[in-house]
Image: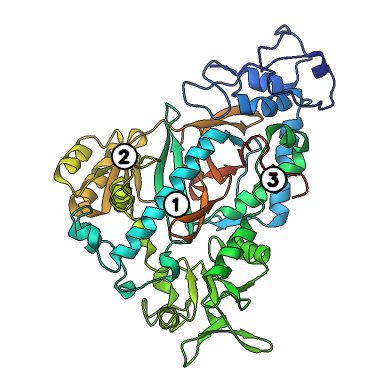
Amino acid sequence: MRCKVMKSQSQQSTQVSSVPSANEQVGVPSMSPSSDSVPQAAVLLSEYQTDQFYDELVESNGHARPDARALLDLINRLPPGELMRRQKSIEQSLYRMGITFTVYSDQQGTEKIMPFDVVPRIVNELTWQHIEVGLKQRIHALNLFLDDIYNEQRILRDGVVPRELIETAGTLLPACNGLKPPRAVWSHVTGTDLVRDATGAMLVLEDNLRCPSGVSYVLQNRMVMKRNFPQVFAASRVRPVNGYADQMYKMLCAMAPKPDDHPTVVVLTPGVYNSAYYEHSFLAQQMGVELVEGRDLLVDDKDNVRMRTTSGLRKVDVIYRRIDDIFMDPEAFRKDSMLGVPGLMRAYRAGNVALANAPGTGIADDKVIYAYVPEIVRYYLKEDIRLPNVETFVCLRDSDRKYVLANLDKLVVKAANESGGYGMLIGPASTKLEQEEFARAIQANPRNYIAQPTLALSRVPTMVDGKLEGRHVDLRPYILSSAPDDAWVLPGGLTRVALRKGSLVVNSSQGGGSKDTWVVAQPGGERSGLQD
């Protein structure tokens, strides 16, 4: 359907007027098609097609969704070329701030500016309440699962999760057996990827419980959007996201072995060549803590972690680590690691330092284990899952594998521990040769693969070559957990957008970009101000 926009006399002016009240509607332009006074944005919106996909801003009848009316009316009122001008202004701001990521496989250079789209995604308050409750339930159950797997293993003895899947998982770390993190929290920072299907139902696509990245883009996207769209923020009742760093710092301080003694917190990074180094430095700066590399830390003869400073050694109480488990400590994991801190696991086991996230969390975001999360929730919490999974076929099961091999042209096949859009087959867009290669890989190692239906992911209007077109999106909210049953969800998240027409792959390493995510506040709730 085409998105319909209403033209009023105020649109004859080149000035941006006030946004509409909640009961105003976006309708069909009342001018004749031959008129050359139609604002460019109005033309863009009148030609916008939802193409039968669920659209986050536009209903199937072509009208703006209630919470998007203010935004789309503003776009309609902008003078010719203004939306593109603001898009370029934001891109230049992000470029000057050095907001980058790294694509190691790109032969034309690894350092990239994160692509950004000027049209935000809007999530209404009821949908967000559903998301928030579902995410808290999910991370609660997964923290209990991790604590069980590395200790009693009740869930395996009871046959809820097949023991074979756990024991053959590359992310299971024997060095973590018997660990008891403070407050039984293993994943303090979680990024859970959500998608909407053709009906608008919100589904969990995957869990990220190791070192989830992307929150810096959320914070910076919001900052540049407020500067460029100040009028529409008040009318859209957007919840703020600027409190994330404060929430994280409070959570990290509460984890300290002696939280009342003004603990020393650091962010541990692999260094400047890591794909998310910008984020590491940004979060350290926002929290007001030191950004360190492995060579800046040592473990003394009393199993305390100390930081090298110009005034001598200083005890470290909490480490927010952005180093993969196996590179974290060459004594416990990879002997050849030059990135970690020798003896860090000894200090952790002794209770002298807290780690966020705890090592070993990768077993809970293995894509095969993901298929069992509804059962995991039911086992530990005695509840049905609030945010359902995408239907998933586990290739280790004979019946599932047979179905997958017979339907590779229709399914999305994923390797258990790949990320960034790698190790994946999108059946409808694949060649026969690619399908044959995946069939051989599945037969050789069925434990390593799952498959899912090819979803018609929801879309959002996106600026493409000077006009608005629908592009597929997902959403990564961020959850901070200070106790298994106590979590805080950032009111928003990283909306990733597949900028290539028809593409379902939203990862930045595969040509995707990001959008600001506006969560609508409840009446009387906290709203994002222009100065926060």
Q: CA distance from mark 3 to mark 1?
A: 23 Å
Quarter residue 209 falls in: bottom left
User: Which kind of residue does numbered mark 1 sit on?
Assistant: Gly
| Residue at x-position 35% and y-position 50% | 423
Residue denoted by label 2: 452
Residue denoted by label 1: 420
User: Which kind of residue does numbered mark 2 sit on?
Assistant: Gln
Residue denoted by label 3: 91
Q: Give the image location of residue 373, x and y in percent.
A: 32, 49
**Compared with residue 77, is residue 484 higher up or lower down, i.e. above or below?**
below
Quarter residue 149 falls in: bottom left
- Taking the image as shown, residue 198 lies to the left or right of residue 478, namely left
Q: Nearer the viewer, mark 1 or mark 2?
A: 2
Q: Nearer the viewer, mark 2 or mark 3?
A: 2
- Taking the image as shown, residue 72 lies to the left or right of residue 156, namely right
Q: CA distance from mark 2 to mark 3?
A: 35 Å
